[in-house]
């Protein structure tokens, strides 16, 4: 038999049945558990993606990749994922009109995680998949496995949460917390989504509200997360200019690394996820490296203390069309 879970409430109820010893059915996730939604409200966020927000979403993706790598390989290193795994786990966001409202389908993501759980017993597998769906899609239990706001306010926030929850919601949180406890894979996803959510909050410090699934951060919480940010922060930027390629590293399947240098940048390493580019674009980049020619690229970088700490190639620009010279007029 199969069962469809389409809301946080459905998932929690089924999780409670599993805890009572019921054997699981084949699970399909739909509705709010089929999508990851990130919504950013504020004056600068109206169907737009400023460079620093793009950086925050990239950090969210990297954190989830790392947790997925831990689930599939036992090591939280995204380099351990195959090209096929990276492609299936990639969160492809669509931006809705009217606000910075991002949606990413999770069916392929959850299916790939399920494949990695094939050797688990049915109850453990079902419990893990439900908890991961609750964390990633539902944004449920924000920060349960990590300290989000610090020891100073932890008890105050805990008291506010308890007072604000109805008895049924309190029971739901207890069921979720019990399933999360002792499960290292689930805790990795909780840490990843928490850190990713914090990265988005730090990349949009002027936002009035940020939602990641059912996790809601108001302006006060966003300000607090930014106050608690490390003193030395990376500064995101997007470079859209011509580069020369001095070195190519394609040893890792699906991911290429290039040593680039542009006007005033010095040399730095940029990664390229091959699944995001056409074969024609990949060929153009390699030919530019072989011929030592300049190529125009859009590169998302992160600087710290003025130095480029990380970079990712986002787009290969179309080559400029060279028009033939005008014929000379005869006197």
Image (cartoon, rainbow, N blue to C red):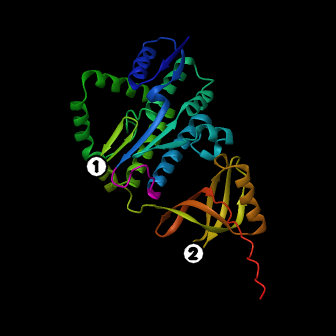
Where is residue 59 shown, x and y percent of the image?
A: 49, 50
Q: Earlier in the sequence, mark 2 or mark 1?
A: 1
- Local SS, label 1: helix
- Local SS, label 2: loop
Q: Residue placed at 49% from the left, 18% from the top?
A: 4
Q: Residue placed at 76% from the left, 78% from the top?
A: 327
Q: Is residue 291 left or right of residue 311?
A: right
Residue situated furthest bottom in the rendering: 331
Q: Quadrant of residue 296?
A: bottom right
Where is residue 163 shown, x and y percent of the image?
A: 21, 31
Q: Which residues are magenta?
A: 42-52
Residue position for label 2:
264
Q: Is residue 183 visible?
A: no
Where is residue 50 shown, x and y percent of the image?
A: 44, 56
Q: Is residue 276 visible?
A: yes
In the image, residue 157 lies in the stretch drawn in magenta? no
Q: Quadrant of residue 1?
A: top right
Main SS class of the magenta portion in the image? loop
Where is residue 323 shown, x and y percent of the image?
A: 72, 70
Up the image or down, 229 lies above or below 34; here it is below
Q: Residues within 10 Å of mark 1 (few under 14, many from 20)?
A: some
Up the image or down, 193 lies above or below 1; here it is below
| Depth order, front residue of 40/168 | 40
| Depth order, front residue of 318/274 | 318
Q: Residues within 10 Å of mark 2 (few under 14, many from 20)?
A: few
Q: Quadrant of residue 269?
A: bottom right
Q: Is residue 140 left or right of residue 3?
A: left
Residue position for label 1:
219
């Amino acid at each position: 038999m199969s069962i469809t879970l389409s809301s946080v409430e459905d998932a929690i109820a089924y999780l409670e049945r599993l805890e009572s010893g019921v054997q699981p059915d084949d699970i399909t996730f739909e509705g709010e558990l089929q999508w990851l939604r990130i919504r950013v409200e504020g004056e600068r966020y109206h169907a737009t993606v400023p460079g620093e927000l793009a950086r925050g979403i990239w950090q969210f993706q990297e954190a989830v990749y790392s947790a997925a790598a831990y689930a599939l390989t036992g090591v939280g290193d995204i380099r351990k994922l195959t090209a096929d795994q990276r492609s299936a786990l990639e969160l492809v966001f669509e931006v809705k009109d009217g606000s910075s409202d991002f949606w990413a389908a999770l069916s392929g993501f959850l299916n790939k995680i399920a494949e990695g759980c094939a050797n688990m017993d049915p109850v453990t597998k079902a419990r893990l998949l439900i908890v991961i769906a609750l964390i990633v899609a539902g944004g449920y239990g924000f920060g349960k496995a990590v300290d989000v706001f610090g020891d100073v306010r932890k008890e105050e926030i805990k008291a506010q949460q308890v007072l604000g929850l109805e008895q049924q919601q309190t029971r739901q949180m207890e069921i979720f917390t019990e399933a999360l406890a002792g499960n290292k894979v689930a805790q990795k996803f909780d840490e990843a989504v928490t850190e990713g959510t914090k990265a988005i909050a730090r990349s949009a410090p002027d936002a009035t509200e940020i939602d990641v699934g059912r996790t809601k951060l108001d302006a006060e919480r966003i300000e607090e997360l930014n106050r608690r940010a490390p003193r030395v922060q990376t500064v995101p930027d997007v470079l859209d200019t011509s580069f020369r390629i001095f070195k190519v590293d394609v040893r890792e399947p699906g991911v290429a690394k290039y040593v680039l240098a542009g006007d005033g940048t010095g040399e730095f390493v940029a990664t390229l996820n091959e699944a995001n580019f056409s074969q024609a674009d990949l060929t153009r980049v390699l030919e530019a490296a072989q011929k030592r020619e300049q190529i125009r690229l859009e590169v998302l970088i992160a600087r710290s203390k003025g130095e480029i700490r990380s970079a990712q190639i986002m787009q290969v620009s179309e080559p400029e069309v060279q028009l033939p010279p005008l014929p000379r007029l005869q006197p």
